[in-house]
Amino acid sequence: PGSKITFFDMEIGSNGIADPGVSRLFSSFYNSGDGAFISNASWGRGYNGLYSSFCRDYDGALRSTYSDVLFVVSAGNTGVEGTAGTIQNPADCKSPMAVGSSLSYGDDIRSNEKGIEFLADYSSRGPTSDGRIKPDVVAPGHFIVAPNAEPNTEGECDGSKSPSIRRSIDVGSGVRYVSGTSMASPVVTGGAAILRQYFEEGYCNSERCCGSKGCGESFIPSGSLMKAVLMNGAQPLTGGIQRVPDGNVVNEQPLKEYDGNQGMGRINLVNSVPLEGENNIQLITVNDKFIKDGDKDEYKIKIDTSNGCNEELRVTLAWYDPPGAVGCLKCLVNDIDLMIEEIGGGSEVFYPNGLSQQDTSNTVERIRMQASDAQEFRVIVHSRNFAFNRQQYSLAITGCLAEADELKPDLTEAMKSSPNCSREELFTFKINTAETAHQLRWNLIGSTANNGIEAIASGPGPEFGYEYEANETYYHSYCLTMGSKYRFQLMNSAGGGLGSGKYSLSYGAVTIFDSDSSEDFEDVKNHRFQVLASGVKILGKNRSFMTDVDD
């Protein structure tokens, strides 16, 4: 109740449909951030899995202007007889969430059909030409009850009876049965709308979700977080492939997880988020966090089954990658790796997507594994081989997770995450918050050899769903270049004084700034300095960024 839906008419008379272009399509529903954040595309075209100019447009838009949008796309209906590499466009792009079709369930199963654990043979398949896993997930799409609009009749979609499944797609009163991945993708889109409502209605506290409405605080999930959570909870199909309708089984053997048939499997919201009275899982999220090339974020978790939880440990990493080159044979631009390392014991390392090594192709990586009570693990997010200096990523962790002061790496971990410089070359911003939560932004800018300016790092404000909690200590550490000049700027995110606290800036063992008392963050804080072999030179606070003058 209260939800709204918008449609975009892509029909061109009797000539079928035409792609209106990313800008026109997205702006029509997004409405500058005041409209829809989830879009379903039950359409496609054939490019044999090749990365096209259309993919460049969609991936570019989702990474930049529409990073809070989840774009759900039908995989296509060209996979008859289980043909690989038939995934349609734009389902074959990196950031859209591609959906294949499983068969139906319960009374919607036709005679001789195997049911929801089997894939419909027409569902288009991956991999893409550069080896990426597609589709991402599957959902029931075969014989789905849908509205049957009759232009000359009012209220016909309310329906007084259901159509007969024994009469193929003959109509009932206002509804009929329809099949295809174009019906599977709206199932995922509807699930995504419920998931977004879950986050907005306060089912989560900071990074950890508590499982009941209002138990936490509302926040806005990024598109990559929505994708990570949905794919994290997906369950692999236990059946094979069946020719439909009423056909033979093409493949009786269970499909493999992470293959070109089903991707991560069929979505399941009960596997995805904590729900009071429905499950015992815990969920920890990281929402669109920035990571710099070469950095490593490490999150420690501990397994606790004391409440009767017996769920497996699942971790999924997702990010909206920059667009690749048209026709690319390796389309991943910013490579981020996900690993889980056992702490103590056998110190075993687990890799994503069924591999025994890092994944260098996909923009979604998942690890599923059994874990025992009291086991401890380190979840590692490692950036490498970036074409661009920074990338945002999202992370979903579910399982029997112990309550802990999660996801705030201490100073030692922050230094470990900067492998390209020594402790003496490390710039650290430390902030101690006061008794109120802080919505802050900060940025670190440096000079380049040709007198240019380079953005080194920044801390996102609440538009990225991030707050500094009350009475906490946070560290942010980065490598600096000898001889370069830097400006560090700290401000609030909403134009008003939002709390106070103490903060300090240091370079190695040298203190650049340390507030003696609590600072009011209503005013913008500016600090300029230069890194020299002899130490740190403080530059004039009220002068040009590039002016080499002592304070």
Image (cartoon, rainbow, N blue to C red):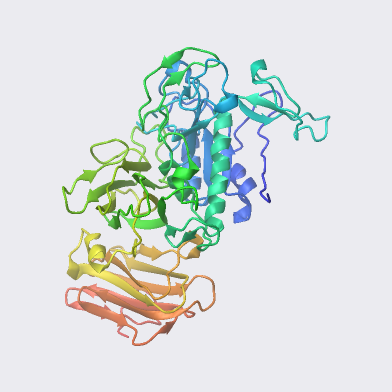
Place of residue 27 in the rendered image (x, y in percent of width and height, measured from the top left): 61, 48
Side of 456 relative to 494 (left or right): left
Place of residue 267 in the rendered image (x, y in percent of width and height, measured from the top left): 47, 38
Place of residue 375 in the rendered image (x, y in percent of width and height, measured from the top left): 25, 52
The one nearer the camera, 182 or 69, is 182
- Can residue 445 be seen at all in this image of the molecule? yes
Residue at 42 percent of width and 70 percent of height: 469
Residue furthest out toward the bottom: 516
The number of callouts visible is 0
Place of residue 133 in the rendered image (x, y in percent of width and height, measured from the top left): 38, 33
The one nearer the camera, 412 or 60, is 412
Quarter of the figure that contains the C terminus = bottom left
Residue furthest out toward the top: 248
- Can residue 89 be seen at all in this image of the molecule? no
Above or below, comparing residue 355 to residue 101 in the picture: below
Residue at 31 percent of width and 49 percent of height: 386
The one nearer the camera, 462 or 194, is 194
